[in-house]
Image (tube, rainbow, N blue to C red):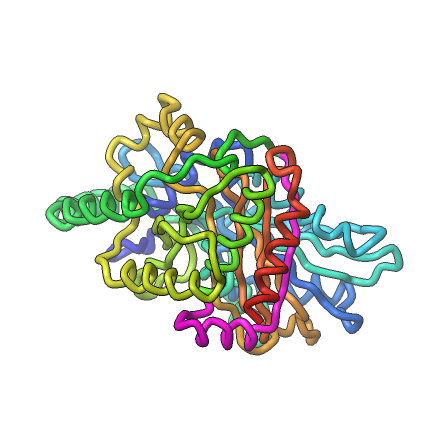
Amino acid sequence: MTGSGTDVDRLGVDDLMSLSGDHGTVPMQVGGVLWFGPDAPGVADLTGHLAGRLPAAPRLRQVLTRPPFGCGRPVWVDDPRFALEEHLRVAEVSDSREVDRVALDLLAGRLPRDRPLWAGRIVTGPDGTVLALVLVMHHVLADGLAALALLATLADGPAPAADGFPQPGPTRRELATDNVRGRLRALRGLPGAALHLVLAGRMITAGGRAPRTSLNQPTGTRRTLGTVTAELRDVRSGAHASGGTVNDAALAVTTGALHALLEGRGESVDELVVSVPFAYRLPGQVTGNASAVMPLRLPASGDLAARIRAIAEVTRAAKRRPRTLSNTLLRPGFGLLVRLGLFRRFIDSQRMVNLVVTNVRGPVEPLFIAGRPVRRIVPLTSATGNLTVVLAVLSYAGELTITAIADADAVPDFRELLTALGAELARLS
């Protein structure tokens, strides 16, 4: 946030919660795999292009610093030690199928807190040809929408203006003054905060208690990844024919696939509670975690068209309800919960949702990086606690991609899940 009279870019309260509570089996990170075609840029061209675009994405060269006592929350400042080669490296693979493993390793690896919170890999084949660019960043640096906005700044465009990097950080006096102002604003906002607490409680409990399934169990550090794709126009046509949106259709496809997976395990579940993130971005906010989750109880069995209609009714009703950041409910005393280990225990044993499904609308036209088109983008996300499956949906340049990421040990039937997702998409088309 920006203080009055001085530029103090603080870590938001909800971002601070995400950072402080990030002690699960895998870190809270997001990203994407940007696939190039046979006309991919060379390693040197791609590296030079990204280096030249950094002034357009200042957060990629900023680090979080903890102010002195009494000076408030951590602050984003330019990192004078920033070196692109510490974040962007080359990874050679013998086969394009190994790109997923590079992406998963990067997604599951914890980013050093004393550096800008992102990492990238230029993945090449044995002959040095660039196959893909993998970018991963911590959730406090960007959520799904902010990650796409950040990607747009790295794509081809007008040369960014010089920014005089690195800029000096705020002084202790400026930090203390800004902290006092922030606390006064918080006091004035107490009546509104009380209302947000009530709204957050209603949002979090809206889905009711999630059914008991094998989707919720302890997770380890190993992950597996797979994708299914479809033409966006086919998905949109199928969704509209059933009275829903692309988002409703994507939810119907994922719940149907999970129903098939559970049936294969001998479990009969007609409904699932799905955590659906939604944007809650403030005016002018580009970076950071400005999203909350909305638990929705959705049908998982029956005819696909009927599911889309039913899900459309659920999502329309949810959109009509007042919304707020669901983290609001956890803000009071959050630090104490983390120190006592109670927050981690809650996340590891929660009974509120069965899975997470994110859906982000990407660019309609292909992005160009270093003069070459990005042919496909595979979204990456992570879920912590006792969620064994997380799904990320992204539309990009006329294609809809669903990425499934699962605990490799808790979901030994992962191939069956991908098959079921593909079958549901085919029915929709």
Q: In this view, does 382 lie above or below 402?
A: above
Residue extending furthest toward the top = 340
- Relative placement, left or right, of 100 versus 377 is right
The residue shown at (56%, 49%) is 260
Residue that appears at 88% across and 59% down: 127
Q: Toward the viewer: 257 or 221?
A: 257
Up-down: is 427 above or below 119?
Answer: below
Quadrant location of the C terminus in the rendered image = bottom right
Quarter assignment of residue 318: bottom left
Where residue 211 appears, as percent x and y from the top left, is 40, 38
Q: What stretch is highlighted in magenta?
A: 222-247
Is residue 214 visible in this depiction of the protein?
yes
> As drawn, which residue projects farthest toward the right?
127
| Residue 409 forms part of the magenta stretch | no
Q: Position of residue 375 (x, y in %)?
A: 68, 70
Residue in the foreground of this view, choosing between 392 and 370:
392
